[in-house]
Amino acid sequence: MSSDPLPTLRWGIIATGQISSWFVRDLALSRPDAKAKHIIQAIGSSSKEKGGAFVKQWIPNVSPPPTVYGSYEQVYAEPNVDITYIGTPHGFHKKNCLDAIEAGKHVLCEKAFALNAREAREVFAAAKRNGVFIMEALWTRFFPLVQTFQRLVHEEKAIGDVHRIFCDLGLDMDIASLGPESRLKNPALGAGTLLDICIYSLTWGLLTLDAKRGEQAESPKIVGVQTVSDSIDFATSILLLYPSGSQGILTSTAMFKTPEVFCRVEGNKGHITVEGVSASCPSAFTLYSKEAGNSEGKRYTVDKPGFGLYWEADAVAQDIAAGRTENAIMPWAETLRIMDTMDEVRRQGGARFPVD
Ligand SMILES: NC(=O)C1=CN([C@@H]2O[C@H](COP(=O)(O)OP(=O)(O)OC[C@H]3O[C@@H](n4cnc5c(N)ncnc54)[C@H](OP(=O)(O)O)[C@@H]3O)[C@@H](O)[C@H]2O)C=CC1
Ligand SMILES: O=C1OC[C@@H](O)[C@H](O)[C@H]1O
């Protein structure tokens, strides 16, 4: 029995694209307040050369270095891997998750969890059958800043009753210039802004307009409009209308980079603005309370090394060490609620995937 009080988790990384490069760098960071010890045990890539180059470029100092495999299957079969991190495009998530689960591995799968709710339900059913942990990597929810925001809004009622939230995530993606194989252009890979970035705007709406999540959460009326070309959405706007009358106006676009302040929450006792590089990665929010009366507002910030993906990784390690198969901040039912909502938005808005 180790004297180290922190749980240890041995990761197998599936795919060597952008997000995997962020994730491994965050796992490798030395953090005084870490809640878990992360070991990058194995890397699985479409080629061993690509996997080796990934290690050399992003985690050259990790010691011992991870074992690099030229296939994903070898990672699933690796006995020293506890959990697989799935960093492939959306269209592969279902297969990658099912393969990992059938091999008995726990799974942390990037957002969007699957192409549609039907696929997501299939994956959760397999996880349940095999008794493994699985979670959608909606990292934003694990930021301490976001948890402070939720506490102020829901527990302290710092801006009273919330009436509306506006949240936008826009990126200038120049989709026209991308090749047909790009995950941002190919409908089979789940292209379009809804699954890629509107999912964050939707997340802010859901966690602001309702303190509950998953099956306990209220069911708002959903209206979705999309600007669609070649069956993928270049822009999506979601309206949520809750039984209380509160509204979410939650948007994304591939044609314009959202300015620093990406979100405004309005209540009867004040408002909050949230800022950061994008809705996925908030760096500060400012609370303007009518009662406190200070027009400059009170600013809450986060000072973090790296990207901030380690907060979700720590939470996963703690869950697995405690024998849990799902996480309380991002439970399976919350992922299904998001997938069901995005299916409904696409039904109304017109974006389609070949698997639908
Ligand atoms: N949490 C966050 O902030 C972010 C999350 N994401 C999510 O992460 C996932 C991956 O995104 P991202 O890293 O940007 O994607 P990339 O295109 O940068 O990388 C995807 C990787 O998946 C593997 N892959 C396997 N099959 C294919 C295929 N047919 N086409 C392309 N790639 C393939 C490749 O790795 P290999 O060759 O090694 O097998 C590739 O490098 C998505 O679900 C996305 O939504 C993305 C960015 C940020
Ligand atoms: O999850 C994401 O957040 C940041 C974006 O740059 C990226 O396209 C998206 O996948």
Image: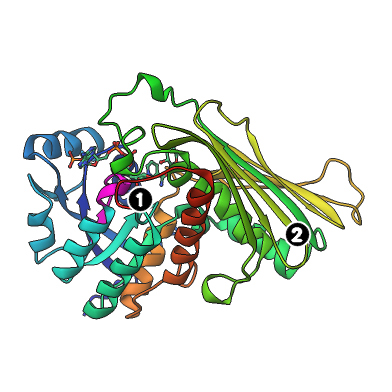
Residue 78 to residue 238: above or below: below
Give the residue drawn at x 32%, y 73%. 320
Residue 86: in magenta span: yes
Nearest the viewer among 79 and 122 is 122
Of labels 1 and 2, earlier in sequence is 1
Tell which quarter ligand 2 is in. top left
The residue carrying mark 2 has its beta carbon less than 8 Å from ligand 2: no
Dot 2: element:
loop
Instruction: Tell me where residue 352 appears, x and y as whole percent.
Output: 39, 45
Q: Determine crowd level at label 2: few under 14, some 14-19, many 20+ residues with C-alpha closer than 10 A.
A: some
Q: Start and end of the magenta stretch? A: 84-92
Query: Taking the image as drawn, is residue 292 in sight?
Result: yes
Q: Determine crowd level at label 1: few under 14, some 14-19, many 20+ residues with C-alpha closer than 10 A.
A: few
Left or right position of 279 against 62 = right
Residue under numbered circle 2:
246
Residue under numbered circle 1:
30
Left or right position of 35 against 92 = right
Give the residue drawn at x 75%, y 52%. 164
Instruction: Tell me where residue 250 appears, x and y as whole percent.
Output: 62, 46
Q: Given the image, on which type of amino acid does mark 2 rest?
A: Ser
User: In the picture, which quadrant includes the N terminus?
Assistant: bottom left
Instruction: Tell me where residue 2 appears, x and y as whole percent.
Output: 23, 75
Q: Given the image, on which type of amino acid does mark 1 rest?
A: Ser
Label at residue 189: none
Instruction: Tell me where residue 49 appears, x and y as whole percent.
Output: 8, 35
Dot 1: element:
loop
Nearest the viewer among 13 and 305 is 13
